[in-house]
Image (cartoon, grey):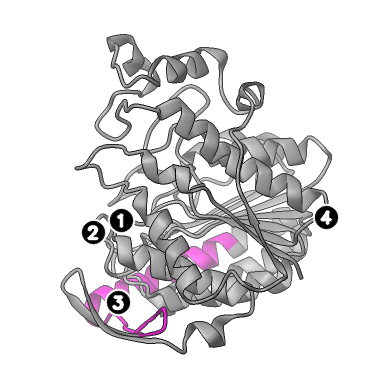
Amino acid sequence: MKYGMVYSHEFNKFSYGHTHPFNLSRGERFYQLLEKNQLLSNPEIELVKPKPVPEELLLVAHSPAYIKALKEGNQGEFKIEMLRFGLGSEDCPIFTGMYDFCRLAAGASFDAAMKIMEGESNFIFNPVGGFHHCKRSFAEGFCYVNDINLIARLITLQGLKVAYIDFDAHHGNGVQDEFYADQNLLFISFHESGKYLYPGTGFENEMGRGAGVGYTVNIPLEPSADDEVFLYAYNELVPRLLNAFQPDFGIVIFGADSVTSDPLTHLRLTNNALAEVAQDLRKRFSRWIGLGAGGYNLEATARTWALIWAVITEQDSEADLSTLGGVFLGGTELGVAGFRDLRSFSSGPEKDHAMAEARRIVRYLKREVFPLVEAK
């Protein structure tokens, strides 16, 4: 197996603003963690320095008017007409180098996908990718350019089937909207229920439209859903969906905002759960890309991605050698061996409700979706 990491230290020079929760230094912290633990030194691992994506490729996923507005904001100057594109909002502020950042982030995902398509690698991780909320002509949810829609559209245009699996705590509404009527992309999203969290979408009855009916699968989780709840739903649904769909390419969003310590969400996962699904998916995909997406506790996000990287590249035993001790995260004392969180579980009525809802949704999806995609 051949692996790659796509990253540029140039990302560290961009900023959404000092008070914005989307802190781009998390990518740098993650990369430093890998270097410190010698997790990039394997000769099977290629370090890829991304190039800005050509502007004409952005038009695969976005309208010309929207790209024009992005370019106009590159000097950091706000114009009132930008608001109709979602630019200049509290979530998506105008900042110096905004368009340059977008092209580099999308370029990282594009370069990774093309290397895999050309057979140069089996898996590549891009920590500064996964901007799953952005629409064709509208920025939202900290996302200015939808790199997922770009690479998925280019791959499906070649007649190939893409499985998109999203573990970010926020529903990937921008990707769902783009491929809602497309049977060549299987959309699977685990996220905190839209009853409690932005963007307020992603309910289990959102299953696609037209030819795409059955190819959108949403698993909304209740607050306090923990590893047990999450892994129950994953194991009941994902293996059978993938076996039925038989994808040619995988795109997986490893959002780290589903872990207990994240300040913006209410799920109770530990990074062990994400590592477990990463371990499973590495056996199911021969060509796939991992993207970072959300994660708003800087250290927890870096450690979570480092653990996922170590597991996928079969270096997880080495990653657990250095004991970092207890780390105080968001009011909860967690012991950490290497990169791993101490396993912790919800309890009481909240846990019972979260599991009951997960069981209900799994039954619903097996009844309504499985027959449509011939999952067994």
Q: Mark 2 points at which residue?
A: 263
Mark 3 to mark 1 CA distance (whole Å): 24 Å
Q: Name the residue under label 4.
A: 119
| Residue type at the position of mark 3 | Lys
Determine the main secondary structure of the stretch shown in magenta. Answer: helix
- Kindly tell me whether residue 236 is visible in this rendering: no
**x, y percentage for residue 177?**
54, 35
Q: In this view, does 227 lie above or below 357?
A: below
Q: Marks 2 and 3: which is nearer the front?
A: 2
| Residue type at the position of mark 2 | Pro
Q: Marks 3 and 1: which is nearer the front?
A: 1
Q: Marks 3 and 4: which is nearer the front?
A: 4
Q: In this view, does 197 lie to the left or right of 183?
A: left
Image quarter (top left, top right, bottom left or bottom right) of the N terminus: bottom right
Name the outermost residue toward the left. Answer: 331
Mark linked to residue 296: 1
**x, y percentage for residue 163?**
68, 53
Q: Is residue 171 left or right of residue 7?
A: left
Which badge, 1 or 4, is on the more N-terminal residue?
4
Which badge, 2 or 1, is on the more N-terminal residue?
2
Discs 3, 1 touching: Cβ within 8 Å: no
Residue drawn where x is 71% and y is 71% of the image: 43
Mark 2 to mark 1 CA distance (whole Å): 7 Å
The region drawn magenta spans 337-365
Which badge, 2 or 4, is on the more N-terminal residue?
4
- Kindly tell me whether residue 137 is visible in this rendering: yes
Which badge, 3 or 1, is on the more N-terminal residue?
1
Q: Mark 3 points at which residue?
A: 351
Label 3's element?
Answer: helix
